[in-house]
Image (cartoon, rainbow, N blue to C red):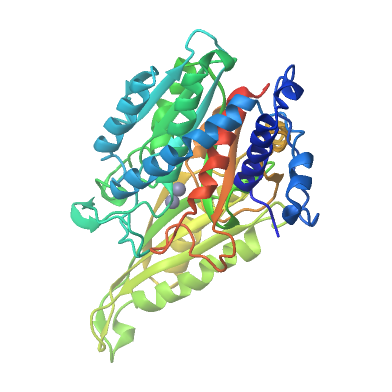
């Protein structure tokens, strides 16, 4: 049985209280902190009570920090549940922005609301004079999904998605990201003298993309939240030297932190291809150019890009045609067809090949059939690449805080605009497991049944604090 971090901290606190109650406070005088050590998976010590407590008393996490995370926990949970019930879509997060800004101001943290291209962002600045700033990032937008978890705090919210009413919910877990960073900010503000540097809290909108306009309807798509903040100069303005972010993930135990060294998440891009043939009677195909047949050939040929054009020793690539539309009735040969798809890779060079080859293959497949093809590519997010040195140091620091953290090459397959920060400064994007103990085959992020075990939030709060206190 794996021991989650929250339980580990609880055990430690029970031990400390026992010591204090037993008049052993003097034993701790002179210690700069409580020392705690990870209990091995298969130690069998979990049920041994005091034996675990003695073992875990070797952590380097400051005493005030563990106490603060525990004391803050009920508020972390209520912050998340509130935000969960008040989700807003990308670039419309005005109520969320106001909530975050008010919360940070109440802690005595300097607040800036919005930048030129990210009007709903919130930047919080702690210890502005100390320098050596790090950025801690939480994304704040929700998804156009009808929540189907059955939770008593499930979202019933509605919003507008590309001009149409939609159900809205935090089925990617950004409510947890906000709650963890807000709680970490409150703790840091209460102990600001113990934080050795400036800390910039970056609450960014529209990680899931803009919800106001379909990007295909714009000649130049809007920037995502992270890219907008990068291009608006946030990293330079606040002198951010490193960026850290956390994403909650289903299918990993609550409280477990997984940190990749190098590529952590894939790039994502999208395409729309229109094939123009010539409509004809279905009984006389020789008198037209069949767009349906051309589209079918193109779906096949696109798959050959991955299998025949990319260097698979470097990494992987995915091309998926998710939508194919052609024709109107059975006895008319379609004169046009439209395909839309998604493109993923965990390697920037492979990504370049995919983006170059898709329009070429579309054009030549269409020409072979006597049709023509127009391809529109939307370049969305680059590969998210963790700085290997910083990732390794962070894993060690998290473990010394008593958190269950490990270096991992687990790539969940998704994509993130955190990648834009990571292109600019050394950065680490952590995954935080959120499955309740014993849960199996849980619904993934973006499912209408995605749920988060609140117990996981403590590890996220602690990880932010660890990042702020680390010697990077
Ligand atoms: Zn998402
Ligand atoms: Zn997300």
Residue 233 locus on image (x, y percent): 43, 21
Query: Quick one: 143 or 328, which is closer to the camera?
Result: 143
Tell me residue 186's x, y (percent). 45, 26
Q: Is residue 280 visible?
A: yes
Q: Is residue 120 visible?
A: no
Residue drawn at (32%, 27%) of the image = 101
User: Above or below — where is 147 with respect to 455?
Assistant: below
Q: Decide if residue 121 is on the left or right side of residue 133.
A: left
User: Vertical placement of 173 versus 333: above or below?
Assistant: above
Residue 414 relative to residue 225: left or right: right
Query: Between 209 and 102, which is closer to the camera in this rendering?
Result: 102
Look at the picture and state if 338 lies above or below 115.
Answer: below
The quarter of the picture where the N terminus appears is: bottom right
Q: Which of the 4 image quarters holds residue 207?
A: top left
Foreground pick, 303 / 40: 40
Residue at 50% in and 23% down: 188
The location of residue 251, given as percent across then percent down, is: 57, 60
Query: What is the quadrant of the C terminus in the image?
Result: top right
Residue found at x 52% / y 18%: 191
Picture residue at 65% right of the left edge, 32% below the top: 21
């Amino acid at each position: 049985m794996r021991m989650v971090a929250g339980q580990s901290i609880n055990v430690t606190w029970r031990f400390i209280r026992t010591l204090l109650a037993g008049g052993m406070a003097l034993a701790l005088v002179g210690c700069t902190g409580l020392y705690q050590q990870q209990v091995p998976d298969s130690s069998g010590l979990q049920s041994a009570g005091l034996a675990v407590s003695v073992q875990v008393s070797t952590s380097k996490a400051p005493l005030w920090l563990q106490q603060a995370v525990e004391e803050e926990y009920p508020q972390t949970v209520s912050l998340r549940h509130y935000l969960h019930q008040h989700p807003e879509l990308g670039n419309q997060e005005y109520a969320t922005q106001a909530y975050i800004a008010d919360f940070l101001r109440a802690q005595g943290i300097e607040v800036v609301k919005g930048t030129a291209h990210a009007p709903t962002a919130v930047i919080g600045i702690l210890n502005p004079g100390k320098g050596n700033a790090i950025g801690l990032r939480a994304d704040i937008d929700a998804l156009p999904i009808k929540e189907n978890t059955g939770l008593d705090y499930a979202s019933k919210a509605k919003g507008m998605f590309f001009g149409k009413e939609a159900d809205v919910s935090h089925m990617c877990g950004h409510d947890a990201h906000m709650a963890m960073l807000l709680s970490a900010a409150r703790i840091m503000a209460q102990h600001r003298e113990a934080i050795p540097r400036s800390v910039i809290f970056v609450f960014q909108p529209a990680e899931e993309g803009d919800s106001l306009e379909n990007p295909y309807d714009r000649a130049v798509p809007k920037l995502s939240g992270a890219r907008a903040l990068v291009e608006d100069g946030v990293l330079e303005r606040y002198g951010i030297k490193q960026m850290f972010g956390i994403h909650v993930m289903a299918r990993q135990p609550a409280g477990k932190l997984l940190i990749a060294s190098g590529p952590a998440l894939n790039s994502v891009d999208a395409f729309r291809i229109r094939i123009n043939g010539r409509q004809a009677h279905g009984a006389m195909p020789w008198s037209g150019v069949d767009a349906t047949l051309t589209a079918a050939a193109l779906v096949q040929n696109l798959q050959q890009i991955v299998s025949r054009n990319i260097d698979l020793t470097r990494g992987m690539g995915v091309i998926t045609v998710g939508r194919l539309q052609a024709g109107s009735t059975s006895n008319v040969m379609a004169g046009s067809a439209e395909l839309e798809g998604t493109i993923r890779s965990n390697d920037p060079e492979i990504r370049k090949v995919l983006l170059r080859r898709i329009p070429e293959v579309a054009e030549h497949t269409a020409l072979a059939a006597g049709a023509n093809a127009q391809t529109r590519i939307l370049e969305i997010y680059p590969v998210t690449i963790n700085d290997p040195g910083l990732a390794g140091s962070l894993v060690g620091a998290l473990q010394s805080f008593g958190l269950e953290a490990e270096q991992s090459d687990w790539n969940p397959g998704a994509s993130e605009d955190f990648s834009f920060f990571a292109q600019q400064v050394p950065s680490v994007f952590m995954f935080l497991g959120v499955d309740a103990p014993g849960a199996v085959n849980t619904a993934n992020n973006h499912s209408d049944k995605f749920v988060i075990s609140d117990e996981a939030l403590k590890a996220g709060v602690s990880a932010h604090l660890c990042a702020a206190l680390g010697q990077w």
